[in-house]
Amino acid sequence: MSIFDVQDSETETSPLLDEAPQKKQKTPLPKLQIGILMLVLLAEPIASMSIYPYINQLIRELDITGGNDAAVGYYAGIIESLFFIAQSLTVLKWSRLSDRIGRKLVLMIGLFGMGLSILCFGLSTSFWTLVVSRSICGMLNGNSGVMRSMMGELTDSTNMAQGFALIPITWCFGSFFGFVMGGTLARPQDRWPNLFAGQFWAKYPYFLPCGIAASVVFVSFMLVFFLEETLATKRKRNIPSDTTGDQPLEEYRSNDSPSENMANVPLRSLLTRSIIIPLANQTFLSFLDISMFALMPLFYSTPTYLGGLGFAPPAIGSWLALFGVLDGLFQGLFFAKVVDRLGLKRTFYISTSCFIPIMIMFPVMSWLVFSRGVDYMVTNVLLCQLLLIVMWDMSLASIFMFVTASAPTKNVLGAVNGMGQMTASIAHAIGPMFATSIFAYSKDHNILSGHAVYVVLCIPAVGMLWLASYLPEELQNRDEHE
């Protein structure tokens, strides 16, 4: 049976149970299409994460802070948040548009905006040009929600965990390449003076990682042409299946089907408890996740006399890349098995419980640096923290599944994922500015020995654990009646 086939009435009423009495046979994943989709997705973490190893050094070199190292966090948070501020204003429109015109065209627009933005970022020589480049990317990019909608349309209740596990895996490996690229290729004239001796590289010392990231985005843009459209009302008739070995896809529904109009339903009609609860959990999760990842490079780069680790960009890139590899391998090998064994809700609850121990390890490392310097003990604690973050990251694929399964029909997947991406973007916009500003303020005023930010972030972490208790025990198959 093709993954796009409309389920019969018996299947429609059978819930997707984490501990079902009779498990349905898993539908094979459409490997070719999902493979292309993941290659397209790979461009986003490569482009977005490549700036993290050097963003703090770039801000220092632009002399935005007037030489005040403790204030770097304020401006780093602003730059990291601008993308999400701009995205929160437009992402729902892009997702709703994808419900009408199809997913592929919206993906191409988003990739164009991303490529243009990263090129502008590499050519920036002032704070305001950094602001403009990040804003361009956010306004034109609604890809995250659209890609999750496509994954929801490429999978069914039996293989959803396998499909959605690939999203954080791809993000992890993309982050790995982005971190390595940003840390290694920043200021190439310092590392390879014979190859990059021209005046251009002296004026734009961070263009090389940005230019390579833009090239990756261009390749992803071309790959979109090989994707089949997954929106039911925009697919062509009788397209053969790819690598599943199934029979050709059946003739698709006519455009006058009542279900097509579901793409135009008022958003307020989707604000039901079954949708709001997963979206609220995703919002909390997004806020805590982006806050943590904004703090990590800032903590790594902060001088040791201020309680940081004093790492240079290459070291920051190496540690973040190591995390990307560990995270990708763990999610790929174990996520689906953990969900099968523990159930989706329990997996989500256990993974989100790791946040508070992760925060505790920041002041522990600061204390060790003050008392011993950066030695093997600090390295061991840092490794333990990265392993806990790997556990934490299981929550990302879990909440994507909850949000996708909350859509009543596939025809409103874009709208539901768009709402999720909008609220996540708002959380992503607030998180870096909030976390890095409190980090800088606590260092400036020595609040709780400079560790106030870690205590403050534990408060919403407790709130998220309470909110997670309201998630459904079981995922229900969405109503696909046409």
Image (cartoon, rainbow, N blue to C red):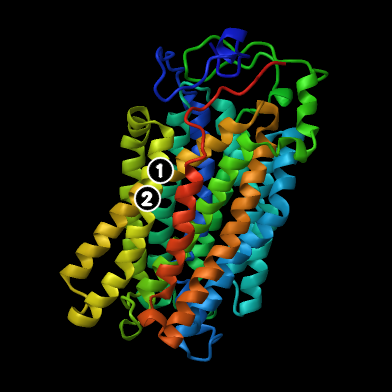
Using residue 440 as the reference point, say whether residue 259 is left or right of it.
Answer: right
Name the residue type under label 2.
Ser
Report whether residue 204 is seen.
Answer: no
- Residue 185 in the image: state x and y as whole percent: 41, 67
Q: Name the residue under label 2.
A: 353
Question: In this picture, is 54 found above or below 164?
Answer: below
Circle on res. 111: none
Q: Which of 300 and 400 is in front in this view?
A: 400
- Residue 224 in the image: state x and y as whole percent: 60, 38
Q: Residue at x 48, y 27 (%)?
A: 474
Label 1 residue SS: helix
Q: Which of the image's four quarters has the C terminus?
A: top right
Q: Name the residue under label 1.
A: 349
Q: Which residue is drawn at 24% across and 82% down?
A: 370
Q: Which residue is drawn at 67% across and 64% down?
A: 135
Name the residue type under label 1.
Tyr
